[in-house]
Amino acid sequence: MEFFRNPNIDFLGKKWYFLAFSLVFSVAGILSMLFWHGIPLGVDFRGGTLVYVKFSHAPDDNAIRAALDRVGLHNAKIQRYGPLTNNEVLVDLDVQETSEAALDKGKAQIINALETNAPAGKVDLNNSSSSMIKNFLLEKDPLHLGTDADARYTAIAQAIVDYRDKTKGGVLHSLDELKEVADPPVLASLQEGYYLSDFGVRNVEIVGPQVGKQLQTQAKLAVLYSLLGMLVYLGVRFEWIYGVAAVVTVFHDTLITVGAFSLTNKPISLTVVAAILTLVGYSNNDTIVVFDRIRENIKLMRREKLADIVNRSINQTLSRTILTAGLTFLTVLALYLFGGEVLHGFSFALVIGILIGTYSSIAIAAPILVAYQDWRAGRGKMAVAMPVDTGKKAKAKANV
């Protein structure tokens, strides 16, 4: 299947437009990384505490941020998590303790910040553990149990928590909803000691700063090794200039992709690094296809200029490039639009990377080959034009 039939586009004739386009986006990304947002690292790399909160209504990010500021949790990053109808929020706190107590501390800080108008002497059932509920029931003993009280109330408390978290998604709207899992005396006792807030803390995760630094180092090494491996492979498979051109192209793609994250202030996580490594392989594959056709045509069209050979090679592979890149782009675009918050950074990196990677295989890699060939030809002409040894020539004339 061919998307184009015998195209004849002068890509190298438009190289200065391509260069201007690349410079604009590269410089914009560099300026953003240096003076604006920097490189927005996710909690995987910088360390911190992630708190997942579910609300019974659509959350207000500004109200949440103001509530966190009131209790001293400044500069918290708040983002919607999952489908909008789930009313879930991910709160990124700059708390980098790694102990078990830090998990409870992060959860308690969020609960303390978001709880408003709590009735005096009552506990929030939406943020109570099964052990807390069990201890309350043991103290009240609404069923008047004897020696079997501990086991029975443990089962009841666990059933309440499971119903809240698994059936109701983490937030109860009314204590009457517990009629399915709690006897009337138990429910009456809970109504005396508990109330329901409009949110529930679903989970707390912590990444220590030392782990974050190790992950940063490993991510940089992974990208560096992939570039070096690609340079060696192309140097052996083709010539070293092909490897240099491919590495420069991939560096260009990576710079623009990371710059896009900085410009949009999207955090770079481990999944984003995985996407960048995927981009390195994808862009390299597309570049090799063009390079391989150039090498074949050089053998067939020895008397033609390299620029004409490169242009013809790009046109010959254009249908394959557009079909492959187009289908891949549609896939990652669907992933970006419908994949959910967890895959948002990963798919965003691939959306930008595939567009730039396909463009650079044509607009960056191929012109580098022609520029190098022209530079080498220019040096050759200069060497021929220079006198080889003026001293010997003068001596020869004198002898004659």
Image: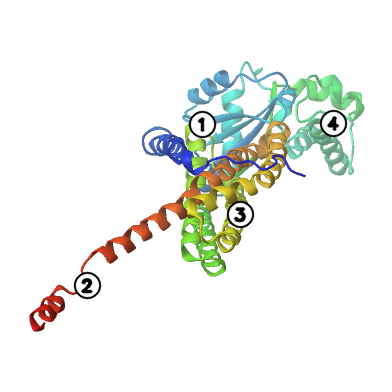
Q: Which residue lies furthest to the front in this view?
A: 400
What percent of the width, then of the height, locates residue 85? Answer: 74, 23
Given this view, does label 3 or label 1 mark the residue nearer the observer? 3
- SS of the residue at dot 4? helix
Q: Residue 167 carries which label?
A: 4
Q: Which residue lies furthest to the top in this view?
A: 117
* Total residue callouts: 4
**Callout 3–callout 4 Cβ contact below 8 Å:** no
- The Cα–Cα distance between marks 3 and 1, rounded to whole angstroms, is 24 Å
Instruction: Let me know if residue 229 appears in the view.
Output: yes
Residue at image mark 2: 388
Q: Which of marks 1 and 2 is nearer the N terminus?
A: 1
Residue at image mark 3: 281
Q: Identity of the amino acid at label 3? A: Gly
Vertical relation: 179 (above or below) 279: above
Residue at image mark 1: 264
